[in-house]
Image: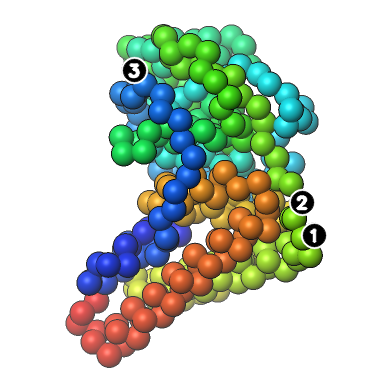
Amino acid sequence: MALPQILPSHKPYLNPNNFFLIPQSNYSQRNFPSQSILHRRRRCRSRSSIRCSASSFPEKHHTGNPKSDDVVELPLFPLPLVLFPGAILPLQIFEFRYRIMMHTLLQTDLRFGVIYSDSATGTADVGCVGEVVKHEKLVDDRFFLICKGQERFRVNKLVRSKPYLVAEVNWLEDRPSANGEDDVEGLANEVESYMKDVIRLSNRLNGKPEKEATDLRRNLFPTPFSFFVGSTFEGAPREQQALLELEDTAMRLKREKETLRNTLNYLSAASAVKDVFPSSS
């Protein structure tokens, strides 16, 4: 499930298909050698497809209980998108070096690091492990993969760059809030409420029924729920990256709450305009 996509605040027009109002923010990055990444992200639309939904986000989002001070080597796959723990990512692999990587992974632990990269900002320091949960070898040695986000990591140093990137990383875990006074459960409930309102108004502006959104949390604890919310901010990868890098659940939920509140205000104004000038929609 994805919420409406970003609409920069300076745009003078209303586009009901693309209005996600998200502030852009700076984030830490490491300038690895530029990568020519060939991939295709397929959206899963049918009921039989694997979807990214709240039920995909387990209460414990990694296995093996890795510790933050553990240091391991991890193959990296730079992509112009952000993977969150618990999220589902379909990929088609057909660039030669990444086909080599997949052959290696399929004989080992099926895990690699997905890390955000674009031509303007370079490659980020923080990424998320993608675990291959389903794969199919296609013609010409290509692969179609279904991956699931696991634990987050921070790159310490690059070990090698050929035939594909391998880095030394350590694991990231959310720490308790500094003041210890944040009600993360209450924040998660507020974020869910804003999400429901955004979905309702977005449906209205797109001419869809304004039915009440169902339970979005699905009994998720606040931390995995915050990752789920971040995964819905499609179209704003830099904001998603900033959310991924936060190591405080309360701070992540507060930022998501502010983003959703701003989006709701925008959608409310757009809805009012549509009511007054129906033909403008």
Residue 142 visible to the viewer: yes
Residue 95 tag number: 3
Q: Measured along the vertical axis of the image, is residue 114 above or below residue 33?
A: below
Tell me the colour scheme of the image. Answer: rainbow
Q: Quadrant of the C terminus?
A: bottom left
Badge 2 crowding class, 10 Å Cα cut-off, few under 14, some 14 to 19, many 20 or more, is: few
Question: Would you identify the image quadrant in which residue 273 lies?
Answer: bottom left
Q: Mark 3 and mark 2 in contact? Answer it, CB < 8 Å.
A: no
- For the view shown, which residue lies furthest in the left direction? 279
Q: Position of residue 49 (x, y in %)?
A: 49, 41
Tell me which residue sits at (59%, 51%) in the image: 228
Residue type marked 1? Gly
Tell me which residue sits at (61%, 63%) in the image: 254
Whichever of labels 3 and 2 marks the residue nearer the N terminus, that label is: 3
Count of numbered circles in the view: 3
Residue 176 tag number: 2
* Horizontal side, residue 115 vs residue 276: left or right: right
Q: Measured along the vertical axis of the image, is residue 29 above or below residue 223?
A: above
Tell me which residue sits at (42%, 20%) in the image: 143
Q: Position of residue 131 (x, y in %)?
A: 59, 27
Question: Would you identify the image quadrant in which residue 4 lies?
Answer: bottom left
- SS type, badge 3: loop
* Horizontal side, residue 215 vs residue 146: left or right: right
- SS type, badge 2: loop
Residue 165 tag number: none
Residue type marked 2? Pro
